[in-house]
């Protein structure tokens, strides 16, 4: 199913919940505590292990500890090659990754400059993608494979891809650079001086007329230093600093900025009501707010995050999760179209909210959902969690990836599009199941109908929807499928993990 078609479907239920709902984007997920021992593999099996052994024995590049750096890359740290992927963020119709040499690479749709590789406003693109809307297709400027964001300074360490914009953090000082869709100032400056691009979500009615402020060249967000994490939505950006504070900028009409105001801000403003020591922030794909986790295990949200029973507020409030006592012992909180999931400090994962597409991971779907947290079925001990659309994934301590929720378009990575059944009109699975065919994974991230995983050799794997090359290869190549679980839809996908192409 295409992003646009599914956005439209979700919008109907979202509008019924709140008049101030807004499309929320994506931020990265990365965890060092899942780092593997050398040669230890997940479900990649003997084939992956043999390949790694052969590479080490016949290294024609730079030997880097137990690693062999390929493609002429240098060794920049013990066991770290300059071309290792170290961070990834799944976006709306495009995604981005950071490589160990401090460069950022993006791929997919670039119609609003969200890949950061254009001149001025948008990008003519090296390729033409087909954006799928049911049985209708629209041509887009895009990049089939990863392309370097050349205008960024050196030393980038983290990246966040929003629905139609992206940001990156410079490691030396924690400065934030952003590019792409800027209608409400989400890029961090007044959009009045930006060029114009055609807004894809309005292209049918506007005929592709360039009307939306956009910037294909990265620019520095003023007033932000010490940033260590990003959380982006379609029109709002947030950053967590090393001091445990959260700052947001962009659209704020529904309380998304958390500064007790109800208007947009082109400058970064501090989120109010949060305790000290924030350690994680998150947004969803279709909601008008954001959430955070504090070092004491408490969870907090602001704006309108849609899934009940959390209230819509203009400053941060503590998450109760339908209980008389606040949610506690939280290590990580994520929320999607209509559900919350939390990874607890003991590695358990609990979810609550709507369950019309099995996104709570509690077996058969429940149209009514649940208001209090319940454990996800099939998870042993999780060290990472992500989910901001209608599927969720975890990373086990042994490097295995497990996913649940909507199976159409291949986002669950199981090699098929069927799942366990249909909850609404979408094939879904309510049990967390291991993604086969992967070596040991150290980081995960999800996007719209896509999932990404970095392995212990620094390679980036992707699976799911690919009609705009958002999993990093030319659509209809690499054994891509068409009509991905829906005969009325012309979308392109790959339900099996494949390597993102074009990276150094």
Image (spheres, rainbow, N blue to C red):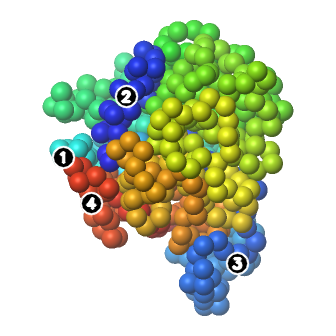
Please name the residue that numbered disc 1 is placed on: 135
| Disc 2 to disc 4: CB gap under 8 Å | no
Task: List x then y, in percent, for residue 4.
Answer: 31, 38
Residue hosting label 2:
11
Between residues 488 and 211, which one lies in front from this camera angle?
A: 488
Query: Which numbered mark, 3 or 1, is in the foreground of this view?
Result: 1
First in sequence: mark 4 vs mark 1? 1
How far across and how far down the image is residue 398, in percent?
72, 66
Query: Which residue is depicted at the point 18% across and 32% down?
Result: 204
Say which residue appears at 37% left-offset and 54% top-offset: 409
**Sequence-wise, which precedes: disc 2 or disc 4?**
2
The span from disc 3 to disc 4 (Cα, nearest Å) is 36 Å
Asked if the residues shown at circle 2 and circle 1 are in contact, with their CB atoms under 8 angstroms apart, the answer is no
Q: Is residue 75 above or below residue 488?
A: below
Estimate how packed mark 4 is, as few (under 14), some (14 to 19) or many (20 or more) residues with alpha carbons within 10 Å. Answer: many
First in residue order: circle 3 vs circle 1: 3
Q: Check disc 3 and report the residue beneath it.
A: 39
Distance from Cα at disc 2 to Cα at disc 1: 19 Å
Q: Position of residue 83 (x, y in %)?
A: 57, 65
């Amino acid at each position: 199913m295409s992003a646009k078609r599914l956005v439209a479907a979700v919008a109907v239920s979202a509008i019924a919940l709140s008049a101030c709902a807004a499309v929320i984007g994506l931020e990265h997920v990365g965890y060092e505590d899942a780092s593997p021992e050398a040669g230890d593999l997940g479900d990649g099996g003997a084939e992956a292990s043999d390949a790694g052994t052969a590479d080490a024995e016949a290294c024609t590049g730079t030997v880097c500890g137990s690693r062999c750096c390929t493609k002429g890359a240098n060794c920049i740290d013990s066991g770290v090659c300059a071309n290792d992927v170290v961070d990834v963020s799944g976006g709306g119709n495009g995604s981005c990754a950071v490589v160990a040499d401090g460069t950022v690479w993006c791929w997919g749709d670039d119609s609003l400059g969200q890949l950061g590789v254009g001149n001025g406003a948008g990008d003519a693109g090296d390729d033409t993608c087909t954006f799928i809307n049911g049985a209708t297709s629209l041509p887009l400027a895009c990049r089939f494979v990863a392309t370097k964001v050349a205008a960024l300074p050196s030393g980038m360490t983290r990246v966040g891809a929003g629905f139609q914009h992206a940001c990156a953090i410079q490691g030396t000082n924690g400065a934030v650079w952003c590019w792409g869709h800027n209608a409400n100032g989400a890029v961090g400056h007044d959009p009045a001086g930006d060029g114009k691009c055609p807004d894809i979500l309005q292209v049918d009615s506007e005929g592709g007329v360039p009307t939306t402020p956009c910037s294909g060249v990265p620019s520095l967000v003023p007033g932000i230093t010490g940033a260590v994490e990003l959380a982006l939505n379609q029109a709002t950006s947030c950053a967590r600093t090393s001091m445990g504070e959260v700052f947001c900028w962009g659209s704020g009409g529904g309380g998304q900025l958390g500064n007790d105001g109800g208007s947009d801000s082109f400058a970064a403003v501090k989120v109010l009501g949060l305790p000290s020591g924030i350690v994680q922030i998150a947004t969803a794909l279709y909601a008008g707010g954001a959430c955070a986790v504090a070092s004491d295990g408490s969870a907090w949200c602001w704006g309108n995050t849609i899934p009940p029973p959390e209230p819509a507020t203009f400053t941060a409030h503590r998450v109760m999760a339908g209980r008389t006592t606040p949610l506690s012992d939280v290590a990580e909180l994520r929320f999607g179209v209509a559900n919350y999931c939390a990874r607890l400090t003991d590695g358990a994962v609990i979810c609550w909210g709507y369950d019309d597409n099995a996104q709570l991971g509690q077996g058969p779907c429940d149209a009514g959902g649940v208001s209090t947290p319940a454990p996800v079925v099939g998870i042993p001990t999780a060290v990472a969690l992500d989910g901001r659309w209608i599927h969720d994934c975890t990373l086990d301590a042994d490097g295995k990836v497990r996913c649940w929720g909507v199976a159409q378009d291949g986002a669950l990575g199981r090699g098929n599009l069927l799942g366990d059944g249909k909850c609404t009109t979408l094939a879904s699975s309510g049990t967390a199941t291991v993604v086969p065919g992967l070596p040991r994974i150290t980081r995960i991230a999800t996007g719209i109908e896509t999932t990404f995983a970095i392995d212990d050799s620094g390679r980036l794997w992707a699976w799911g929807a690919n009609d705009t090359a958002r999993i990093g290869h030319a659509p209809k190549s690499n054994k891509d499928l068409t009509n991905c679980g829906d005969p009325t839809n012309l979308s392109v996908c790959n339900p099996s993990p494949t390597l993102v192409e074009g990276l150094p």
